[in-house]
Image: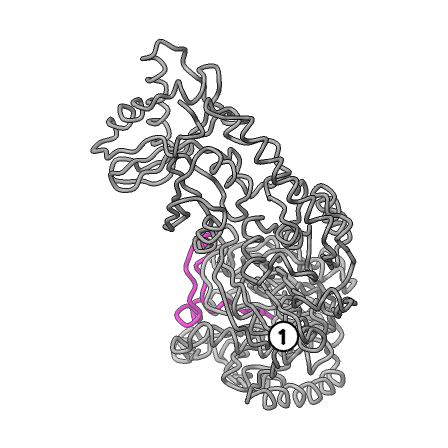
């Protein structure tokens, strides 16, 4: 067999969305019969063509050489069909191999099972030829076999690449959210990079992948030149002479382009460690002299100085992959970053072409630039959007008709409530509560921080519209009020059940100490659904403090024990806090320490409140009981499901068994349409005074049904 005259049927795989680019690339590389399909492109070629594609493709993950294909009716047909391939002419029995299997049908439902059948066929062939059985090796195999089944059609291949071709060899270290080199190359090509582009800037460069892929295109450098190991090197038909000639030609092309270029590749990042990694990557590629790395915040971005000769033949190019803000709480910082970045582009980058890869279209909208083209690309499993902007054209800023209404309302509320809060003696208060219905969120001030709580949008509002409105609200808050992005956090408010009620979010640690009249409280603004302090119950807590002097106080469903703190500061001789959560009781103990409240008279009991009440013997123990149950709870740790509307009389009756003569229960809840069952209360010899209206402070006046508060006592 003369390898040079043999024509092979090959398949180059690629990430979803890159197939058209790969088709163009293979055509430009000069191979024959290129045909695009899902997941890659078929092509024909001799051995030299296969080597050439392996070395030069910027977009393919693997180059697969077809070894055989057949239609199978049952799983037992697979080893028989695979054994027809002359495996002894592909690799030796003393070499190791591995199987990559993909696809499934009614017979093959697990890839591991499919791989086992392929392995059996290979081993059977060696045995039939009287040869030793080759071994499988998961680590560093000599030969990699790829097999795919679709319906009844099974195809098996030799993987000429070995490791995925995105591993160029220059990137030995990377950041926390790396961009695959193949995707980076696609971004660069789609953004308009050519072998004449002389200035390329990445203001979020990280380890430099986008810039270095751009540099390799500009300098005619084969992306595989730095790789030292290839799958075909252990193949029996490998021709080292042909391979070395192709590699040598590529090296000469790179050196020739390098000698003639005056191109510049400029990378900015705010992480000095990543810049150092980027520099090392450039050194490994042999292009360090053409690269500039500088520590800079993208929000202060301006154009680098460009000589006339550098920009005279080709428009300068800015390409970047800004952070996506995937952790809870980072959305706001990311949103404002895109907004300010867009403003810098509009102000300073007239005359540039720009390509921005983002994880969300709504982030791109925050830039307020008009793109002329968008592409859907995949970074692993994450769908991303590449937006292209032509800043050689005028970029009118988008307008929003509601902007002045929202800004005016926020400023008005800020000036009004800031003065009220200072006079009242609190620094945690509600600034905005869906005052304008289309901006459906609440905004709370906690000292120098803002917490934005998004309400679930009505079903008739498209998700994209609701998100756009929310982010416009955040954008306006950042522009009109004195709060930094890192001190703003976002939460989604919707009905929770079970463990979701108290589910901890991705930790961010935005903790503050706030004051409420004469009390201080620790609040965590980022890591839990709630902050540790229900602001609308402020009046009820103060009222509890006023009636607690020399009294025994029981706080049920105590949460972080803020009501107990007010009772203790009010002079309670005993304060007992009961809650199911160990986490929140520990938080409550920290609140007591914060207020310098110590002693055995302050007790913290971890228990299911309903069960605990049932277990208590009826006796007159407490002068005041503070009862603030959740609206609904089906926590797995509770023995019963609690519905405050259905169960409130039962709860009050159980609590009243522990009440002293002339004692009172302060009963509150947050069910919007709650209705007190006065008839059933009367049957239990209980009466209630409605304190709801007086308990709602000015910052919650817009929603008078936000909570209900009653003073319950035994009837005469």
What is the span of residues highlighted in magenta in the rendered image? Answer: 624-650
Residue 378 locus on image (x, y percent): 49, 55
Q: Which residue is mark 1?
A: 391
Q: Can you say whether 56 is above or below 145 in the image?
A: below
Residue at left offset 53%, top offset 65%: 360
Residue 541 visible: yes
Residue 548 locus on image (x, y percent): 68, 72
Residue 306 locus on image (x, y percent): 77, 67
- Comparing 593 with 198, the one in front is 198
Residue 37 locus on image (x, y percent): 36, 50
Q: Quadrant of the N terminus?
A: top left
Q: Can you say whether 664 is above or below 123 in the image?
A: below
Q: Can you say whether 687 is above or below 188 in the image?
A: below
**Left or right, residue 446 beside residue 466:** right
**Left or right, residue 71 beside residue 632:** left
Mark 1 residue crowding within 10 angstroms, few (<14) / some (14–19) / many (20+): many
């Amino acid at each position: 067999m003369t390898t040079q005259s043999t024509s092979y049927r090959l398949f180059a795989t690629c990430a979803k969305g890159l197939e058209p680019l790969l088709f163009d690339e293979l055509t430009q590389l000069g191979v024959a019969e290129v045909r695009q399909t899902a997941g890659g492109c078929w092509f024909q070629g001799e051995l030299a063509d296969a080597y050439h594609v392996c070395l030069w493709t910027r977009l393919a993950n693997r180059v697969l050489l077809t070894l055989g294909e057949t239609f199978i009716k049952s799983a037992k047909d697979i080893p028989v069909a695979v054994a027809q391939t002359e495996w002894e002419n592909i690799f030796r029995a003393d070499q190791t191999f591995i199987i990559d299997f993909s696809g499934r049908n009614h017979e093959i439902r697990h890839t591991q099972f499919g791989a086992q059948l392929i392995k059996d066929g290979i081993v059977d062939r060696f045995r039939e030829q009287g040869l030793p059985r080759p071994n499988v090796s998961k680590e560093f195999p000599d030969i990699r076999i790829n097999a795919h089944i679709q319906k009844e059609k099974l195809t098996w291949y030799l993987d000429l690449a070995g490791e995925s071709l995105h591993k160029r060899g220059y990137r030995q270290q990377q950041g926390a959210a790396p961009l695959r080199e193949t995707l980076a190359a696609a971004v660069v090509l789609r953004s308009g990079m050519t072998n004449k582009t002389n200035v390329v800037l990445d203001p979020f460069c990280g380890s430099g992948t986008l810039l270095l892929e751009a540099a390799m295109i500009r300098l005619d450098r084969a992306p595989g030149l730095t790789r030292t190991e290839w799958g075909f090197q252990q193949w029996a038909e490998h021709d080292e002479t042909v391979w070395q000639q192709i590699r040598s030609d590529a090296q000469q092309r790179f050196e020739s382009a390098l000698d003639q270029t005056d191109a510049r590749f400029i990378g900015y990042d705010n992480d000095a460690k990543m810049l150092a990694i980027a520099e090392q990557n450039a050194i490994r590629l042999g292009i360090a002299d053409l690269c500039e790395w500088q520590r800079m915040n993208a929000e202060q971005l301006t154009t680098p100085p460009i000589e006339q000769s550098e920009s005279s033949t080709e428009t300068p190019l800015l390409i970047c992959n800004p952070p996506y803000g995937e952790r809870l709480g980072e959305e706001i910082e990311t949103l404002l970053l895109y907004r300010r970045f867009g403003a810098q582009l509009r102000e300073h980058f007239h005359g540039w072409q720009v390509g921005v890869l983002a994880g969300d279209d709504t982030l791109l909208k925050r830039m307020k630039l008009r793109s002329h083209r968008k592409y859907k690309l995949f970074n692993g499993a994450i769908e991303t959007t590449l937006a292209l902007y032509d800043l050689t054209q005028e970029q009118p800023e988008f307008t929003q008709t509601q902007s002045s209404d929202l800004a005016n309302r926020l400023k008005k509320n800020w000036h009004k409530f800031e003065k009220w809060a200072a006079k009242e003696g609190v620094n945690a208060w509600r600034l905005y509560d869906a005052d304008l219905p289309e901006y459906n969120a609440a905004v709370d001030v906690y000292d120098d921080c803002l917490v934005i709580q998004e309400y679930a949008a009505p079903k008739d509002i498209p998700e994209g519209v609701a998100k756009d409105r929310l982010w416009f609200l955040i954008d306006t808050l950042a522009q009109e009020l004195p709060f930094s992005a890192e001190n703003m956090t976002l939460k989604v408010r919707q009905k929770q059940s079970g463990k979701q009620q108290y589910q901890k979010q991705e930790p961010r640690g935005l903790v503050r100490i706030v004051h409420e009249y004469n009390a201080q409280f620790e609040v965590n603004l980022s890591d839990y659904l709630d902050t540790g302090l229900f602001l609308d119950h402020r009046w009820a807590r103060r009222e509890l403090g006023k009636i607690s002097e020399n009294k025994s106080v029981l706080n049920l469903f105590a949460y972080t024990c803020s009501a107990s703190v007010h009772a203790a500061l009010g002079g309670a001789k005993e304060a007992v806090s009961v809650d199911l959560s160990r986490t929140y009781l520990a938080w409550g103990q920290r609140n007591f320490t914060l207020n310098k409240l110590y002693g055995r008279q302050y007790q913290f009991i971890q228990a299911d409140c309903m069960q605990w009440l049932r277990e208590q013997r009826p006796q007159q123990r407490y002068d005041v009981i503070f009862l603030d149950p959740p609206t609904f709870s089906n926590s797995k740790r509770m023995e019963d499901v609690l519905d405050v509307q259905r169960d409130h009389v039962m709860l009050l009756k159980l609590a009243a068994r522990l009440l002293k003569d002339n004692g009172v229960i302060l009963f509150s809840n947050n069910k919007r349409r709650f209705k007190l069952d006065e008839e059933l209360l009367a049957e239990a010899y209980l009466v209630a005074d409605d304190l709801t209206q007086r308990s709602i402070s000015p910052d919650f006046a817009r929603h008078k049904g936000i909570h209900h508060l009653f003073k319950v006592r035994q009837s005469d």
